[in-house]
Image: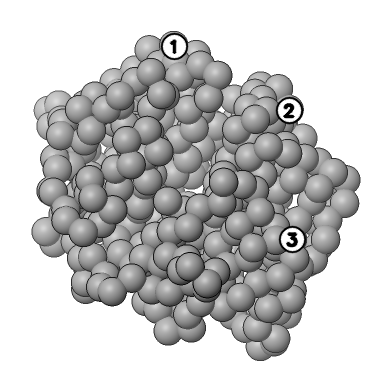
Amino acid sequence: MPSNRLWVATRKGLLGWHRDDAGGWRPNAAPAFLGDPVSQVLHDARDGALYAALNLGHFGCKLHRSDDGGSHWQELAAPAYPAKPDGDDDPVPWDLKLIWSLAAGGPEQPGVLWAGTIPGGLFRSEDRGASWRLVESLWQRPERRGWFGGGYDHPGIHSVLVDPRDSRRLLLGISCGGVWRSDDEGANWALSAQGMRAAFMPPDQAHEQNIQDPHRVVQCRAAPDTLWAQHHNGIFVSRDGARSWQEIPEAGPSVFGFAVAVHPQQPATAWFVPAVKDECRVPVDGRLVVTRTRDGGASFETLTRGLPPPPAYDLVYRHALGVDASGERLAMASTSGNLWLSENGGDDWQCLSTHLPPVSALAFD
């Protein structure tokens, strides 16, 4: 069934939209956390809980949960790093800078949550976010010392995927640290970025798995071995559970971008928001478009109906493009404060707002 509620995490609070009886979309009566930067939002389909991560700068990162659809919120413990051992020469601070991703555990794991953070730590909660522990098996990997920041000063985990067939199987996307896979609920880890290419590195290092910069990694729910990645310098697809990746050479205006979404039932269908990379980070030729493939990357359509004409310089972040469980309803929001929704897989878009704070993430409920 299509989702009828949408949550939008912005620099000035968490905003909500709902679909009314006439089929139109309306904003909720009041935002949550008005004035506070919300970095991530998660709707947990297992119990209906809603989670919001905040980044309050001097006051640190905070985490809240609502059990009544956003009407009331309870503050939870935020993930916390242990003290760095004396004499440790790790250049990365052992201090939480950002909760960059949140993911629910499997249906047979009530209360289990995962949090990916900057500076590159993965945390697990077994009590709906009341407490967290750092996954030491990943944090202590020697390869972690080779990770580095992309847009942020330090590396971070932005994609946490739980395999719907087996909740012990986890996949992480790290900027810049490649893709990592665990088949035993995080006890052991292996690099899974074979086939990715980092054009920003010297040619002899371009294919090193540990320095790849996947901006976002998503997994098809009905066919979990198919994954799509929007990389810093390309689009990549895996059809073997991330054991290998294939680069897609052409994809419309550009293969650079941050966001990617995959159809939950059709693994060959995925959406992207192309841009100009590196110092520009704006739509190509000032024309905001969405690209869609329905044949596994063999060809791409450029979707524009309902999107603004040039000049438009909206940038869509990693978590600001989403598709609901039906695969037909999509939402997209930008750092320029614009929010769009499509009811037909991206063929047509309607603008829900043009005056929001910059948007970092969104989620259907």
Crowdedness of circle 3 by 10 Å Cα count: few (<14), some, many (20+)?
A: many
The residue beneath circle 1 is: 184
The residue beneath circle 3 is: 291
Task: Name the residue at 43% across, 58% down.
Answer: 5
Check disc 3 and give the amino acid type: Thr
Check disc 1 and give the amino acid type: Asp
Using the image, determine if residue 160 lies above or below residue 253: above
The residue beneath circle 2 is: 239
On the image, the x and y values in percent for residue 342 come to: 63, 65
Using the image, determine if residue 89 lies above or below residue 176: above
Quadrant in the rendering for residue 296:
top right
The residue nearer to you, when weighing 281 against 13, is 13
Task: Name the residue at 67% across, 44% down.
Answer: 263
Image-based side of 277 in relation to 116, left or right: right
Quadrant in the rendering for residue 93:
top left
The residue tagged with tag 1: helix, strand or loop? loop
